[in-house]
Image (cartoon, grey):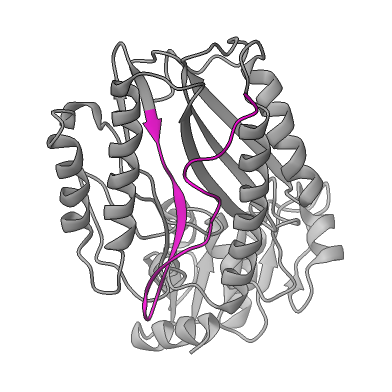
Amino acid sequence: MTRAERLTQALEESRADVFVSAIRPNQLYFLPPPEPSSVLSRANCCAIVFGLGEPVVIPGVWISNACRDLLTDCTVIENMPGDPPAEEQLLDYLRKVGLNRVIVDQPDLVSTLRGQIEGCEVECKDLGTEIRRRKDARDLEHMREAARIADLGMTAAFAAIRPGLSCLDVIAEGEYAMLKAGAEDATMAPAVGEGTFYLDSAENPRRIICEGDMIFIDMAIHVRGYLGDMTRAGIVGEGTQEQRDILETVQRAYRTGAGAMCPGADGADIYRQVVDCFAERGWKEYYVHHLSHGLGLGGDLPRIGSAAADVLQIGDALSCEPGVYIPGLGGARVENMIYVGENGPEELTRCPLDLPMDL
């Protein structure tokens, strides 16, 4: 069943005529191809109406021309300077169509519409988040490409690491490789030295890399709007036994978490297994963040962390990113993009956990 078909089914089950989306990820996922990420890269539309044949786009004046020229298989209600506000255009359109029940994913927009359409009930409900959780073939194709480009960038960044260079030198090599390979944007954040917290005191792009430093590089890119995300860690030189223990433990925690990401797995159990890897070394208190967030076009499920964790489903795409940050020694984290298939987890980012440096 396609994503559009699942939305139609959800509307029927809710006895609703249309789904009005003002949330950017929902808009991106439910618009038909070609990919709309370039059109909506800087702003979401005021609203898009789904459920009456082709989508009806109410963009607002700031993005009207781009939507008119670039969105295909849609009806675009243009908004030029001097036209009524986009919210009024939406209300006027819904009144003309004649509807009994409307579902809207944004509370402020619900307040604008409720009681303004005669004979029509307006409900606030985000139908999109759960429906777009399961990635389809187009999603997976673009995430694989984002992962491929992420691998190129991280490999280039680690190859540039050597004593005497700054973190900016490393960033320049990694980001250039990814932008040249097709990323729309690229960001790398090296953390070097004896940082005592996750990307806090150690994240200084002008920091000069020294022999014996621990270093980890977090990065994020977008390819056709899809997130590419990964982290690698290493030691500049041989390092101490304690530093090598940190790396080994983080890599073991990663393999534990990623290997457990199978359909039906309870995220809370996966999180506990990862925490146990650090607790065995007495480092539980230094694991300070989530294990996983969803991947895709933004705001995706599932999530795995200390406060809340989802049960994994076939079609999920998520990160696996355990890390530990020890005062006086340094920090390390490993992160890959994971796809949960019928046969278990698949690593989308594939460069080695121990990347070579130019030492």
Count of all numbered marks drawn on residues in the image = 0
User: Residue at point 65% right, 76% down?
Assistant: 55
> Measured from the top left, where is residue 143 in percent x and y?
59, 62
Residue 286: quadrant of the picture? top left
Q: Quick one: 174 or 212, which is closer to the camera?
A: 212
The residue located at (57%, 55%) in the rendering is: 24
164 to the left or right of 270: right
Q: Is residue 3 magenta?
A: no
Q: Is residue 91 visible?
A: no
Left or right: where does residue 323 sit relative to residue 174? left
In the depicted structure, whether residue 274 falls above or below residue 324: below
Relative to 227, residue 26 above or below:
below
* Quadrant of the rendering where the C terminus is positioned: top right
Quick one: 147 or 58, which is closer to the camera?
A: 147
Magenta range = 332-359
Q: Position of residue 207 (x, y in %)?
A: 58, 10
Q: Is residue 143 visible?
A: yes
Say left or right for 193 vs 263: right
Rendered location of residue 81, percent (x, y): 83, 47
For residue 356, which quarter of the picture? top right
- Nearest the camera: 155 or 275? 155
User: Which residue corresponds to the image point at 58% horizontal and 70% vertical from the top-left?
Assistant: 139
Determine whether, in the image, residue 203 is placed left or right of residue 164. Answer: left
Q: Residue at x 71, y 36 (%)?
A: 175
Query: To which quarter of the image does residue 130 belong?
Result: bottom left
Counting from the top left corner in percent of width and height, residue 157 is at 65, 33
Instruction: Give yes or no for residue 343 being in the magenta stretch.
Output: yes
Rendered position, 300 above or below 61:
below
